[in-house]
Image: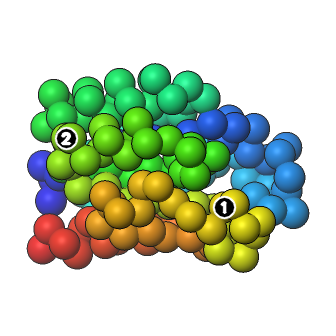
Amino acid sequence: MENTKVFVIHGPNLNLLGKREPDVYGTETLDEINKKIFEQSGKLQIQVSAFQSNSEVTIIDLIHKALEDNIDFIIINPGGYTHTSVAIRDAISATQIKTIEVHLSNIHAREKFRHRSLLAGVCQGQISGFGSYGYIMALQFIANKNN
């Protein structure tokens, strides 16, 4: 597992976690979430890099870079791009890197427009509604998948 490489991509507005709608997203900051991700990845002996961008173009470029860097898995929280970005979906599909979609809130219990993910069909799975623990669940899946 030490050779398993994972990109974690945090999408738009996640840099505002801790301040942004704490009743929906909780009070953890993105730095606190990343700290949990890195701690868990260390325990699981998985190499992790984490990135945040508000830009669709940058997220697509990160997915392309993951292919160049021989990344084994992507964990992505695409934020609002979940419901709008055919381009991010196409990037995941084109690279064929195993991808897990993560959402802090339960998108299926929110506004109707959030119920549909354009990315879900090209991802191995979706974890939604468990807060930051969703990232830990994704790492656990990757660790178990590679055993």
Query: Closer to the camera, 88 or 4?
Result: 88
Residue 95 - label:
2
Residue found at x 14% / y 68%? 146
Which percent across, then down, holds residue 76?
44, 50
Q: Secondary structure at mark 2?
A: helix
Residue under label 1: 114
Q: Earlier in the sequence, mark 2 or mark 1?
A: 2
Residue at coordinates 66% horizontally, 61% vertically from top-left? 114
Please count the marks in the image.
2
The residue that appears at 75% across and 58% down in the rendered structure is 25
Characterize the local packing of mark 1: few (<14), some (14-19) or many (20 or more) Cα atoms within 10 angstroms.
Answer: some
Residue 10 showing in the rendered view: no
Q: Residue at x 80, y 55 (%)?
A: 27
Residue 140, placed above or below residue 64: below
The part of the image, by quadrant, that contains residue 71 is: top left
Q: Name the kind of residue labelled 2 in the image.
A: Thr
Q: Quadrant of the C terminus?
A: bottom left
Q: Position of residue 60 (x, y in %)?
A: 38, 30
Location of residue 86 by image quarter: top left
- Work out how far the residue at label 2 is from the one at label 1, CA to CA, in angstroms: 25 Å
Image quarter hosting the N terminus? bottom left
Q: Position of residue 51 (x, y in %)?
A: 47, 33
Disc 2 or disc 1, which is closer to the eye? 1
| Amino acid, disc 1 | Arg
Report the front residue among 85 and 18. 85
